[in-house]
Amino acid sequence: MLLDFEKLGGLRAFLIGLTVLVCLFLVLPIIFIAALSFGSSQWLIFPPPSWTFKWYQELFADPRWLYSALTSLKIAAIVTVLSVVIGFLAALGLNRGTFVGREALRALFLTPMILPVVVLAVALYALFLKLGLAGTTLGFIIAHLLIALPFSIISIGNALEGFDKSVEDAAVLCGASPWEARVRVTVPAVSHGIFAAAVFSFLASWDEVVLAIFMASPTLQTLPVKIWATLRQDLTPVIAAASTLLIAFTIVLMVLASLLRKGQKS
Amino acid sequence: MTEPFLSIRGIRKEFGSFTAVKDVTMNVAKGEFMTFLGPSGSGKSTTLYILAGFQDPTDGDILVNGKSLLSTPSHQRNIGMVFQRYTLFPHLSVGENVAFPLRIRRRPQAEIAERVKAALKLVRLDGFEDRKPALMSGGQQQRVALARALVYNPPVLLMDEPLSALDKKLREEIQFEIRRIHQETGVTILYVTHDQEEALRLSDRIAVFSQGEIDQIGTGQELYANPATHFVAGFIGDSNFIETEILSSEGGEARLALPGGTVVDGVPMHGGKPAGKKASLLLRPERLSLSQVPVDKGLSVTINDITFLGNNIEVATQTNSGDCLSVRLPFGHQAISQLTRGDRAWLSFDTRSTHAFA
């Protein structure tokens, strides 16, 4: 190896120190939030004078929090399913198609990743007002689908790139109709890409706040919107509790995902 | 004459302005092993893909038992195929791979189990049912693919260079297996390869493809002993060609002037060019005799190199006019022990064993 860690000498201590700092930078805010959510101080004093479950009790006592969490979950789940299905079909077309303008279409599908989210949000809001979709679940789903799709197309597209179409052809000659072959052979063969697409799509919707603020109505709010709205009214440790649960759920999801993937491989 | 089992009639395939297959016509008998032999880009694989239904011909028809196959989609053609690349389904075990065509056909479980077992036994992989394809060698994977293609008893099996990814020794081993399986099952096989040795080893008949057309169809012996074109002569077996002038040509036989003035008579002539034109004369290395003394109608040559190849000896010679001819002599041939590099010698041949192409 050109860069052998063992032979770096004095630089080693520096690198270790830098790594620790970066990790702290990434993890400390989470630890802070978690600590504050269990702290007794109303004013988010750190370190907390004493520990309490008070804020969690308050959180669960207010049905609006639970309701917004369920809204988030529902939207994220629907977005995930749609994103994976549409992403698979789009990636298949972009991968196999020989039509004119294929590269332009691929670029178009990926623009939501490059476009500033605020720009996208304002544009969608103006359009949805006209169509009567603003403040509806459908509007939410369409908006989040837009930013989730590029993740699906990229990860499923990469998986298809590494999949030999002859395998699908073989299934067709074995008697499977083209769509039967895709469902029974191609989909399982690119399952790692589909899995990654599902995880990224879910997270893209689950913790998305900018589009959600524009799409939300007083009665339809996702968890990040609820956190944001509450934050603007008053700074209460309940927000820290909600955030901690949001982060915990995301961490559990990631751990489950990686465990599932490990199980698939072996 | 009875209806041929499989009949390919005037197949033509154009990709834009490029014509991959010009005009392919042939009949294949039931149970026959027919090989499409040719260099890459000669249209042999395209013809096979048209049979499989992956491509539609621009023109022509394919009949099986007198009925056109073209309107039937690939998955209803009931054709088996083994591909050049490994095409086992990666998420399924070997047993499930072989069972796949039967599951698609919704056969009862007991029948599936029995036929999968028989198919794996046929390719000598009994007991591998639970293995994942990724854990098998290339040769084993292709044998599983063969079992999968045969398990539903298709009347026709297509094979598209199935052994080209394997090393030579393994290739020969599986060629032997394919022959045995062909004899045991009696399935009609259409086999694509660019390897003449493989074609000769396996086939009942060989169709030699060149530039989108079939130059000749025949048994390996026919192609070797009586090639119809310059291309076939060069592709099957080893060959020397020298440029000659046609002195006269009549009734399929020609009188030719070799460079250096030697005139040979009664050479089987292919192609209808008149006297005065050039013709290539095919001289097989193993049909040439070498002599230390001048012979009548012989070619005077200089010996450039002598190579010992085990069961025979290859002698590289050069004529006075500069043509390089290789001669293959059996081990222990008299003349060779006394000859060394740079010596003069004379080549002679039976004109009946040669062919001229113009």
Image (cartoon, coloured by chain):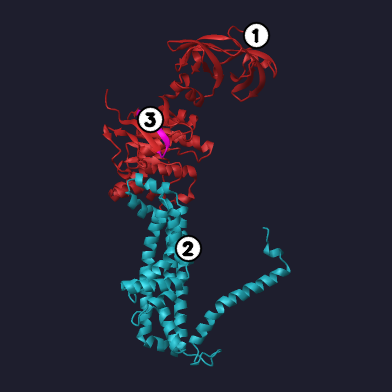
User: Where's residue B115, x and y in %?
Assistant: 33, 44
Label 1 to label 2: alpha-carbon separation: 79 Å
User: Where's residue A30, x and y in %?
Assistant: 52, 79
Residue topped by disc 1: B293
Q: Main secondary structure of the magenta part?
A: strand
Within the magenta stretch, is there residue B23? yes
Q: Which residues are magenta?
A: B15-26
Give the amino acid type for the residue marked by disc 2 in the picture: Lys
Label 2 to label 3: alpha-carbon separation: 54 Å
Callout 3 and callout 1 share a chain? yes
Can I make out residue A264 in this image? no
Give the amino acid type for the residue marked by disc 3 in the picture: Asp
Which residue in the rendered view is the most extreme toward the top?
Answer: B296
Please identify, in this view, whether the residue under mark 2 or under mark 3 is nearer the observer: 3
Residue topped by disc 2: A262
Within the magenta stretch, is there residue B35? no
Q: Secondary structure at mark 2?
A: helix
Q: Colour of chain A?
A: cyan
Q: Secondary structure at mark 1?
A: loop
Q: Residue at x 47, y 90 (%)?
A: A52
